[in-house]
Image (cartoon, rainbow, N blue to C red):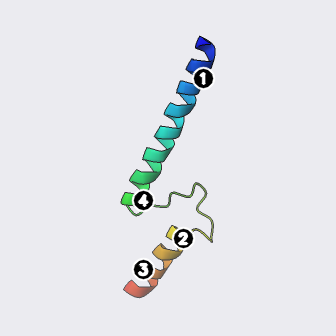
Amino acid sequence: MVKEFIIASLLGIAALFIIIKNLKNSAQGKCNCGSCSSNCPMNNKNKENQKNSK
């Protein structure tokens, strides 16, 4: 019983850490998709901003 509680708590803490990390990246305008591929919305948005600024 205690073992399951510890594992569930660790999973919950890990999930919370990932969510907070993604929210911080989004707030700073960084990519938060995990693997900034060419179809990432944040990557596309950054490319458009760079084109418009030139």
Tag 4, which secondary structure?
helix
Question: Which badge, 4 or 1, comes first in the chain's sequence?
Answer: 1
CA gap between label 4 and label 1 equals 29 Å
CA gap between label 3 and label 4 equals 16 Å
Q: For label 4, count other residues whose C-alpha is less than 10 Å away and answer few (under 14), some (14-19) or many (20+).
A: some
State the mark number for residue 49: 3
Question: Which badge, 3 or 2, comes first in the chain's sequence?
Answer: 2
Q: Is residue 1 left or right of residue 50?
A: right
Tag 2, which secondary structure?
helix
Q: Decide which of 52, 3 is in the foreground and name it.
A: 3
CA gap between label 1 and label 2 equals 34 Å
CA gap between label 1 and label 3 equals 44 Å
Q: Amino acid at mark 1?
A: Ile
54 vs 44: above or below? below
| Quadrant assignment for the N terminus | top right
State the mark number for residue 26: 4
Tell me whether the residue at label 3 lies in contact with that at label 4, contact meaning CB atoms closer than 8 angstroms: no
Q: Kindly identify which residue carries mark 1.
A: 7
**Which residue is found at the position 53% from the left and 39% from the top?**
15
**Which residue is found at the position 58% from the left and 12% from the top?**
2
